[in-house]
Image: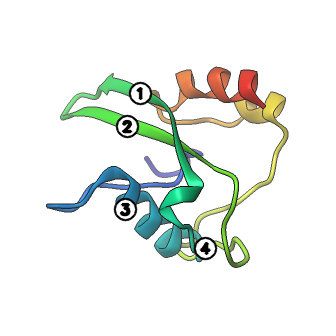
Amino acid sequence: MAGLWEFPGGKIEPGERPELTLIRELDEELGIAVKEDCLAPFAFASHGYESFHLLMPLFLCRRWGGIVSPREGQKLAWIRPNDMGAYPMPPADVPLVAQLRDLL
């Protein structure tokens, strides 16, 4: 999904729980350390793409260690909740924007 703005995360490895996947991916993608007890389940997206079906949990994380920095060549932006809809996202992420905006 090159060129689109996405929520951080990735594929679950065999035997890995979603929370641990997110902790690993946040370190790999953004260079931050997150403890499992700092994650709170929030919502999920279910979307059928042409070649696969995605079931994606969304967690809230209000605490982390380190400074957020792009580790995989991606662009980063700190934006206001009302501006999230202005960024092109994968179809599975779009419904989550309104839920986050309402929370924040």
Check disc 4: other Cα within 10 Å, few if <14, some if 14-19, many if 20+: some
Which residue in the structure is indicated by mark 2?
56
Q: Earlier in the sequence, mark 4 or mark 1?
A: 4
Q: Amino acid at mark 1?
A: Ala
Q: Which residue is mark 4?
A: 32
Q: Is residue 55 above or below residue 78?
A: above
SS label for mark 2:
strand
**Residue 33 appears at what percent x and percent y?**
57, 74
Circle 3 sits on which residue? Answer: 20
Q: Residue at x 43, y 29 (%)?
A: 44
Q: CA distance from mark 2 to mark 1?
A: 5 Å
Q: CA distance from mark 4 to mark 2?
A: 21 Å
Secondary structure under tag 1 reads strand
Which residue is rendered at x = 37% and y = 37% of the image?
A: 56
Q: Helix, strand or loop at disc 3?
A: helix
Q: Which residue is mark 1?
A: 45
Marks 3, 1: nearer the viewer: 3
Q: Are marks 4 and 2 in contact (CB under 8 Å)?
A: no
Of marks 4 and 3, the one in the foreground: 3
Where is residue 13? Give x, y as percent. Answer: 21, 62
Residue 34 coordinates in the image, percent (x, y): 56, 67
Mark found first going from the N terminus, 3 or 1: 3
Q: Earlier in the sequence, mark 2 or mark 3?
A: 3
Point out the tag, 4 or 3, that comes first from the N-terminus. Answer: 3
Q: Quadrant of residue 88?
A: top right
Three-letter amino acid code of the residue under disc 4: Ile
